[in-house]
Image: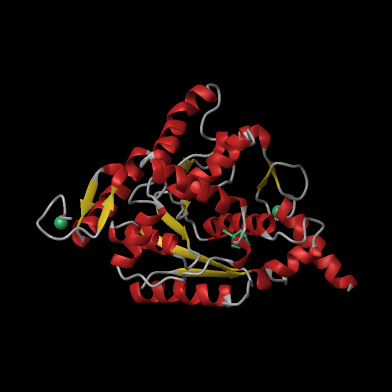
Amino acid sequence: MKCRKCPSRAVINMRQHKLALCKDHYIQWILDQTEKNIQKYKMFTKEENILVAVSGGKDSLALWDVLDRLGYKTGGLYIHLGISGENDYSNQSMQFATKFANNRNLQLHIANTVDMIGSTIPEITSLSRRDKTKPCAICGLVKRHTMNAIANDFNYDVFVTGHNLDDEVAVLFNNTLNWQIDFLRRQSPVLHSKAGLQKKAKPFCRFYERETAAYAILSEIEYIEDECPFAVGSTTIHNKSILNQLEHEHAGTKLSYYLKFLKAKPILFPNIDEDFPSMDDLFVCSSCGQPSPKEGKCSYCRLVEEVQSKKLLR
Ligand code: Q46
Ligand code: ZN
Ligand code: ZN
């Protein structure tokens, strides 16, 4: 198959766009489409400081690479979660993130849960009152708190994540299956800053996972191929396989599901702007000063307190 734009051989065929491209034109297409998304959803400008959450995986490193090539001012944040497993996941993924940043002379902030809380994510999970078999809720809480704290401390204007279309659609599918109205209301390519919460953006939200993977491979980005061991068997992965079947039978299903949801949002939520939660819904944590939906200490500070008191009792 030939490239749509030149006589070279195509390296990727995107059925949903009816577009086949060679390596050079594909890389340029990803750069152009990312810039379009940033503009379309008013994510950020070249004047703002952007903090990229990097896991060492293909999506986040590809995103950092794209933003850097487009001339945005970026720094990265890697959070070491202390997850080992067969592949020594956290240490391995940190090495990929560090090598990427060093090769390009980009600043990488590294936070470590052992320094912040005194324990790894699996240890915190086993000490907390929550479901001891699933660290993901605690992991998400720790990551959100850390990203907001680093963004505030180092004067970043926005933090961005490498979530792709497959991630967004899997979450959307789960939220519609369970009619999670608050989650649906908040699902957006960009959430503007409010009451001490940093602006968040997902510049890759319209790219299929195979497109970001192809970009990472063609751009020779080295990344950790293994998933976090706790991702295995998750609802998200199950939803992704169902959605892949639909996509296989009808190319473009995922993209259309997501874009039609974004179009329907103002009708579904006519009186609510994108800046959810509202100021009235938020308090300031009495310990760390970050915004919190509850009065007193935020969930992160209560978790740290709980873990530290249980460690003292051991
Ligand atoms: S890193 Fe953390 Fe994920 Fe691993 S423990 Fe779960 S939430 S699966 S993105
Ligand atoms: Zn070409
Ligand atoms: Zn707090």
Q: Nearer the viewer, residue 43 or 255?
A: 255
Q: Is residue 284 left or right of residue 75?
A: right
Task: Depth check: give the residue in front, 174 or 59.
Answer: 174
Answer above or below: position of 50 versus 122.
Answer: above
Position of residue 272 measured from the top left corner of the image (x, y, whole percent): 55, 26
| Quadrant of the image where one finds ligand 2 | bottom left
**Residue at far front of view:** 249
Left or right of 128 in this view: 292: left
The reply to whether residue 194 is visible in this rendering is no
Q: Which residue shows up at 33% across the image and 67% down it? A: 217
Q: Position of residue 132 (x, y in %)?
A: 77, 61
Q: Quadrant location of residue 50? A: bottom left
- Residue extending farthest to the right is 313
Where is the N terminus found, in terms of image quarters? Answer: bottom left
Q: Residue at x 34, y 57 (%)?
A: 67
Which residue is more in the foreground, 83 or 174?
174
Q: Residue at x 39, y 61 (%)?
A: 64
